Image (spheres, rainbow, N blue to C red):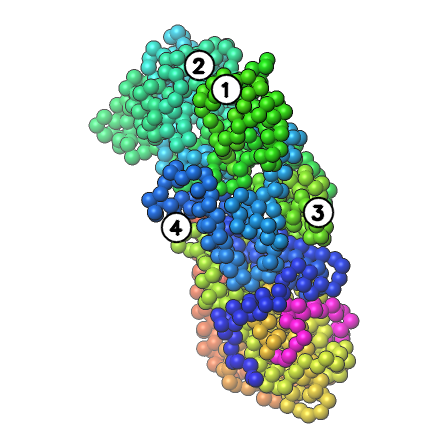
Amino acid sequence: MPMEKTFDARAAEPQITQAWDDINAFAAGANASRDESFCVMIPPPNVNGRLHIGHAFNNTLQDILVRWKRMQGFDTLWQPGQDHAGIALQIAVQKELAAQNINIKDLSREEFLGLAWEYKEFTADGIVNQLKKLGASCDWSRNAFTMSGAPGDTRKGHENSPNFHDAVLRTFVDLYNDGKIYRGKRLVNWDPKMETAISDLEVENVEVAGHMWHFKYPLAGGATYTYIEKDEDGKVTLEEERDYISIATTRPETMLGDGAVAVHPDDPRYAPIVGKLCEIPVGPKEHRRLIPIITDEYPDPDFGSGAVKITGAHDFNDYAVAKRGGIPMYRLMDTKGHMRDDGVAYADAAAAAQGIAEGAEFTTYSVDQLNLVPDHLRGLDRFEARKKVVEEITAEGLAVTTRADNPVLGKAALKPGAEGADTAVALIESKPIMQPFGDRSKVVIEPMLTDQWFVDAEKLAQPALEAVRDGRTKILPERDEKVYFHWLENIEPWCISRQLWWGHQVPVWYGPRVEDGQLIMEAPWKEFCAANVSDMTTQAVQYYGGTVMIFDEEPQLKRVGGPMGIQGTVPVWRDPDVLDTWFSSGLWPLGTLGWPEENDALARYFPTDVLVTGFDIIFFWVARMMMMQLEVADKVPFHTVYVHALVRDEKGKKMSKSLGNVLDPLELIDEYGADAVRFTLTAMAAMGRDLKLSTSRIQGYRNFGTKLWNAARFAEMNDCKPDAEYDPSSCEATVNKWIVGETAKAREAVDAALDAYRFNDAANTLYAFVWGTVCDWYVEFTKPLLQSDGAQKAETQATMAWVIDQCLLMLHPIMPYITEELWAAITDRPKMLVHGDWPTYGAELVDPAAEREMNWVVNLIEQIRSVRAEMRVNAGAKTDLVLLGLDATAATALERNQAMVERLARINSISSADEAPKGAVTLAVEGGSVCLPLADLIDVDAEKARLAKALGKLEGELSGLQKKLSNEKFIANAPQEVVDENRARVDALGDEIQTLLAAQTRVAALG
């Protein structure tokens, strides 16, 4: 049955996907013919996620490597799976519940988790089917999940679904017992809407319009000092007596929790008052707290007043200062971002805090019990409290003032000279500030001091650093090693707990402490860490010397049986928190292969080979996988990490919904086909360089697929069928020897590129070979041969079929669908192309004489075509070709291929001459020169005028752009993508001008 005229991607791709599924084409070990294994772990997308262009790019690159290795006969596994997406899935379920007017707080934990598992099952196939639509050749029978095996898992016990839950809990317990996991009170990103800690990756820092308030902190006891400011030359610009120290803040509500005011040790302005106390200017006057003025390297003397309030419980920089200086850190807010409404009255809390400021001993827990929010502000939303604090301080006259026409006031500033311009007003700078938002909740994140579980990451970091330094794992491009090293060398404790229900529940139970034979019914509690209830119970019974009663949550201890002795029934309850998804995904390579159980897959495929990932998760995921695998298995998880760049829009802007420039890969696949999308992403995947993606590029590569299809149809129409007996090294015809050699060079170049992860080089090599060498040249060169009779025709038919097959084999990893369709359409095969044998031929197939001869012919034709185009010769017109002293080799090449030259270069006749006739353009070729008499084919004067006009226009545009780019203000203020676009246009104009100048020179020679 003849081939269709065109390839219908929308109809063919689902059918081909099903055909692959039917033969289990992607199963681990499929098509294996050698002992070596090759394993790639998919970066697990969220189970309820949707394929975006970054996913498409990432998975295309992985698929290329996997299909290539599978065709080479490696025992290949591309391990798929999904992340349980902790906070993202919980938000999604809560939205579903809200649509039904159900509040999560009205459900028990078990009820909610049942609904979450149902939702997971409903959405799980979505991302899998989207990846299949892209052509991802994962072993879908082994699809893993980061919560498989957890309570409620509907696939629990499935033979190809490893118990990831057990792996996670075992790792936690082992690290806990080794002292590498602990519970502590540290500052974290707190999401007041979700009421949970979140990671830095889940925080979006957004520039918003903000304010900076300036306040006076009065010195204790009415003390004063001489405040002096000097300019750069040391000249005094301000000298006055002050009884306060001035600070500036963007978050006045946090002043209530200040533990100190810090100044730089080298700042002479404040030297007289270092060590003294100052008063926090808010709250009931009779209970105002005094805090010390301390020194620290953190304050910048040149920023603001040079004095910084230290609120260690609500600012990351302040937290570091407080830790260094032993400053108490007072938490002001509850989990909803409201000012605390618990504990003793403010007067009592303030008195206790004052005692600490004066030297009383304190602990982290005792300080946390103190609620320093004044009674009248308790329970207020943090932003409402901010307004109240500002109003109270201003009303008391403790706001720093400035002239009403000070421009830093922004819109509130009066114009200079306006009535009241010299009036003193509160100094409230109007300025843009960076504010952290939850990427999913969209609320302002609050740095908050809370009890969380942490990994002592510093202990795990050193082996991970050494593994990259000594080359066991290589990160490409090498510049991304710096990101990896920087994070691990400056690593902080890793917060791994989340205040959610969806996730791996922390395997720790709490109970009363035993001290001096008595149960202590208050925090800190005794901890029991175990992978299951049975092991925990054994620990607890041994500790208490009696039976225990297990609760799902912390009980009201005063109601549990009254006073108890050690021999009584003791309550224990489980930590309600779950583990950060990065903790479980950090075990991805081992967990998906069934660890901690020993099995064939683990032995066969671990350590894995290559990780393909984005630069934004080098430390969130890559470094953590390195740390975790080295910790639990003492092996690196992969030998190579290929870090790809970002996919941007065609102007270089980051894609975002707000800008309306997002390209949906699923929509692109529907319109252009998966092959075109994949080839575009691959061709633009230059290592370390962001992609600038446009639909016009995708459309262009779809045309490339059409070109390949037409070449295959040409072969079919000329009865070019694959011949099992064909030997590419036995060709007689020069053109066939040449194409066989070009195919061999392409194969070597593609393999070298993929070996070095230069995906774009592989794609561009294939594009040039298939479109240029095969379709544009070889197909045309063979037409006379295919119209002849005898052995030469038969050889050309067999060679053409072989070349088309090689194109399909080499293109398959990048363009799997159209190549698979053609593979089946050309002839009956023993197996599908997905299991085709990757070619191994090379330089032995290159015939230097044939290569030189055909390259000479191609060069001659290209030069003639180029000159005709430059000189605007009518496309239908034929020209004469005059030979000017060719050597024997060149003359033979032309003689043997004269018919092809005449047809493809549109030559009317060929003659020889001692010198070029008047009005001819001379072309240099290897072994001599030729010329084209063109004077009678073009209007020389009109062409001179056209070229002069075109050159003038281009030179004018170039001059304007160069002037713009030399303007420092333009470079400083214009968006970077605009500057880059202008620079690219300058380069393009330079090339266009050079082309026109060459044409102008040629026209001038005509007379």
| Three-letter amino acid code of the residue under disc 4 | Ser
On the image, the x and y values in percent for residue 32 come to 71, 63
| Three-letter amino acid code of the residue under disc 3 | Glu
Disc 4 crowd rating (10 Å Cα; few below 14, some 14-19, many 20+) is few
Can you tell which quarter of the image residue 731 is in?
A: bottom right
Q: Which mark is residue 749?
A: none
Q: Is residue 832 magenta?
A: yes
Residue at disc 3, secondary structure:
loop
Q: Which residue is mark 4?
A: 658
Which mark lies nearer to you, 4 or 3?
3
Who comes first in sequence, dot 4 or dot 3?
A: 3
Q: Which mark is residue 353?
A: 2
User: Toward the viewer: 945 or 858?
Assistant: 858
Q: Is residue 427 above or below residue 755?
A: above
Q: Which residue is mark 1?
A: 522
User: Toward the viewer: 145 or 406?
Assistant: 145
